[in-house]
Amino acid sequence: MKDIVRGWRHIPQRYNLIGSKCSNCGEVNFPKRVICPECRRKGKLEDIKLSGKGKIHTYSVIHTPSDDFKILSPYIVAIIELEEGAKITSQIVDCGEDDVEIGDEVEMVFRKIKAEGEEGVISYGYKFKLSK
Ligand SMILES: [Zn+2]
């Protein structure tokens, strides 16, 4: 029981959206980079906490998922352009394929990704849902 509580407490730190921002050109990347892809050594990168809000840049509906995702079929995977400018790929949850359009506003949510083994170790991660 104690272990479960400890696991929960660590979720915010582990899954905050921390990207990097270049103080030279202003480019934001997620996951964070060690070196700016634009400026190389001229750039100086700083951590930036991303809001988790963005818009759908493009998306696909996946009809032939792997075994891990059997219960989720079909599911939607989108490239999301975050407010800060970084693009990330994530699953869109809590909606049907007809509900999603390019340009829709989305926000990050934490979801169970998978449970494995007899001990029921559960993995969490970020996904996105439509902001409405
Ligand atoms: Zn840069």
Image (tube, grey):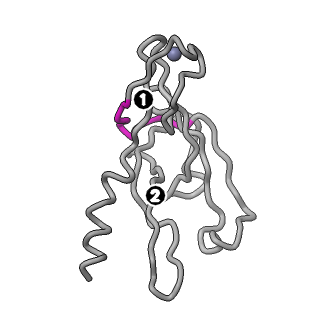
Mark 1, Cα crowd under 10 Å, few <14 / some 14-19 / many 20+, is few
Q: Quadrant of residue 96?
A: bottom right
Instruction: Please determine whether, in this image, residue 36 is positioned above or below residue 8.
Output: above
Closer mark to the observer between disc 1 and disc 2: 2
Q: Are marks 1 and 2 in contact (CB under 8 Å)?
A: no
Task: Tell me if residue 50 is in the magenta stretch.
Answer: yes
Residue 11 in percent (x, y) is at 33, 59
Q: Amino acid at mark 2?
A: Gly
The residue labelled by disc 1 is: 83
Question: Residue drawn 48% across and 53% down?
Answer: 127
Identify the magenta region: 47-56
Q: Quadrant of residue 62?
A: bottom right
The CA span between labels 1 and 2 is 20 Å
Q: Amino acid at mark 1?
A: Glu
Secondary structure under the numbered disc 1 in the rendered image: loop
Residue 63 in percent (x, y) is at 72, 62
